[in-house]
Amino acid sequence: MSNLIVILNVFVIVGLVVSAILAVHFEKLLSSVIALGLTGVFAAAEFLLLHAPDVAISEAAVGAALVPLIFIVTLKKLGGGDEK
């Protein structure tokens, strides 16, 4: 049981790091916002694994849902934001 938790924890941390790097690396803003939302999902999963469900719920609501939604609405109002 402990081995499974360690493997899951490593998977979530690697996913968190990879999605954060992708959020910075993408040239298109919408792709970066989606990767940022994925980073929030991985952070919420890590908080769940660390036995902090209240923080995980807050991170899922704000970091994985609300912030990307605000960024996407802003990009729509600005006309997409991708001139490349």
Image: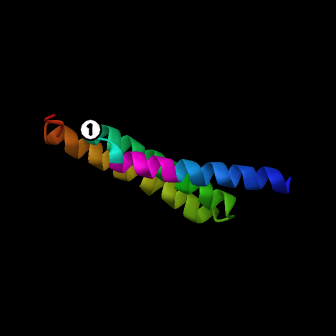
Confirm whether the magenta stretch covers residue 18.
yes
Q: Residue at x 47, y 50 (%)?
A: 39
**Which amino acid is tagged 1?**
Lys
Please indicate, yes or no, whether residue 54 appears anywhere in the rendered image: yes
Label 1, residues with CA under 10 Å away: few <14, some 14-19, many ≥20:
some
Determine which residue is flagged by label 1.
28
* 54 horizontally vs 20: left or right: right
Confirm whether the magenta stretch covers residue 1.
no
* 22 horizontally vs 70: left or right: right
* 6 horizontally vs 21: left or right: right
**How is the model colour-coded?**
rainbow
Q: Residue at x 55, y 47 (%)?
A: 15
* 2 horizontally vs 78: left or right: right
Most common SS among magenta residues: helix
Residue 20 percent coordinates (x, y): 43, 52
Badge 1 element = loop
27 and 58: which is toward the camera: 27
Residue 44 percent coordinates (x, y): 56, 55
Does residue 39 sit above or below 83 in this rendering?
Answer: below
Please indicate, yes or no, whether residue 68 appears anywhere in the rendered image: no
63 and 58: which is toward the camera: 63
Q: Residue at x 16, y 34 (%)?
A: 84
Label total for image? 1
Residue 69 percent coordinates (x, y): 34, 45
Q: Which residues are magenta?
A: 17-24
Q: Residue at x 66, y 53 (%)?
A: 10
Does residue 18 sit above or below 55 in this rendering?
Answer: above
